[in-house]
Image (cartoon, rainbow, N blue to C red):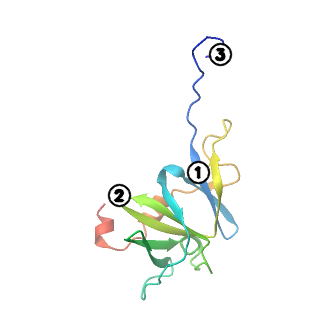
Amino acid sequence: MEGVEGVERVEEARPQWLVVTSGEAVFGIPVTQVREVVRPGGVRPVPGTPPLQAGIVNVRGAIVTVLDLQALRTGERAVTPGSIVLLQYGARPIGLAVDRVLDVRTAAPEDPDGPAGATVLDAVALCARHLHSAEERTR
């Protein structure tokens, strides 16, 4: 409320997205799904897995499955991921290899449903559909 002494105007919290690229496409992942972003070094391929699985990575002692956003979108594995976005799925993280992390964008008042210039991506739902262990499917 403006004009009233001692009362500050409280602005509503607006949604935010981590904006990433995959090929030419730009996506906004809700920051509520993002645990952290890590460098892709140390990703180890797992023999016999489908192309959409980039491999596994050790993050502070936890082994994390890393899926390739490019392969999820097109069926073609990315040449080299630029970053891994760790998503929270139940009690454990899922890694999503992306080409680049651009920035974090806040919803504009005139467009609260998405980040400017990017397509909203429910990354957790996308990745969860492709996890193969029985344990992960039961969550």
Residue 32 position, x and y percent, is 49, 49
**As drawn, is 23 to the left or to the right of 121?**
right
Residue 16 position, x and y percent, is 58, 46
> Residue at (33%, 73%) from the top-left corner?
133
Quarter of the image for residue 60 reads: bottom left
Q: Is 92 situated above or below 105?
A: below
Q: Is 4 situated above or below 60?
A: above
- Closer to us: mark 3 or mark 1? 3
User: Disc 1 marks which residue?
Assistant: 17
Q: Quadrant of the C terminus?
A: bottom left
* In-front residue for pair 119/68: 68
Amino acid bearing label 3: Glu
Amino acid bearing label 2: Gly
- Closer to us: mark 3 or mark 2? 3
Q: In 3D space, how far apart are the residues under numbered discs 3 and 1 (Cα atoms)?
A: 30 Å
> Residue at (57%, 14%) from the top-left corner?
6
Which label is found at residue 73?
Answer: none
User: Disc 2 marks which residue?
Assistant: 90
